[in-house]
Amino acid sequence: MSGQQQDWHFMSGEAKINKHTWASSSISALVSRCSYGLHFTGPAVAIDTGESSGLIASDAAVRALREGACQTAFASSASWISNPYELITLCAAGFISKSGQTRVFDETSDGYTKGEGVVTLLLRRHKDELKDQDLRAVPDARGLILGSGVNNKGQSSSLGSPSGPAIQDVIGRASRDANSPIFLMDTIEASASGDKLSDQMELMAVASLRCK
């Protein structure tokens, strides 16, 4: 599960500390609470890598399944605006659109806006899924993850700017892991920060890789 720990501290205000405070303010306790409530007995891991948290959680789940650490994995990520602190800091850093609209890949783009939502994936090994489908034990799968890749850009022009070589590297990693050539890729989901230069760099990196 992906998430951040500071939300509760801004929500609680003058609330008095009691026996439930720790379990309500710790991201590690949050994921353990999910396992407790649903009686999950496998590894329960909390991940915070910012906007990529959901992808990293999914990658960790895929690798746990491949290694046989579990038979079923849940990868979940949530975006919840519980207080103004994050928006204020993002505005100060120049990431949030002053117009209140996201216009990615548009010449009038001036940043992005944040939204709320929750996504949870139930992941199983393909061979197990096929066997159980034959027994009518589970509904049809909605998708198949062939490969996964993770990296970090290291040093670049700034902390928030993308790196063309790093983007190409991580796509190449996922492609090799899937044993699927890049030219078969027909859809991408861009980071799309709403920054003109960053969006241009990302699009050029993907286009260059796609044309190789």
Image (spheres, grey):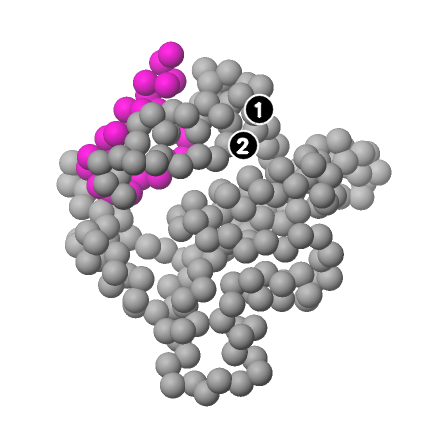
The image shows residue 190 at horizontal and vertical percentages of 36, 35
At a point 15% along the width and 41% down the height, the residue shown is: 108
Residue extending furthest toward the top: 212
Q: Which of marks 2 and 1 is nearer the N terminus?
A: 2
Residue 202 lies in the magenta stretch: yes
Check the image and name the residue furthest to the front.
155
Q: Mark 2 points at which residue?
A: 148
Q: Name the residue under label 1.
A: 178
Task: Looking at the picture, tell me which residue is in the foreground, 126 or 103.
Answer: 126
Mark 1: secondary structure: helix
Q: Which residue is drawn at 37% across and 29% down?
A: 167
Three-letter code, disc 1: Ala
User: Crowding near pointer 2: few (<14 within 10 Å), some, many (20+)?
Assistant: many
Asked whether disc 2 touches disc 1, contact meaning CB atoms under 8 Å apart, the reply is yes
Instruction: State the residue at coordinates (63%, 55%).
Output: 44
Characterize the magenta stretch by its predominant secondary structure: helix
Q: Nearer the viewer, residue 123 or 104?
A: 123
Range of residues picked out in magenta: 187-212
- Measured from the top left, where is residue 137 in percent x and y? 80, 44
Vertical order, 126 against 61 (above or below): above
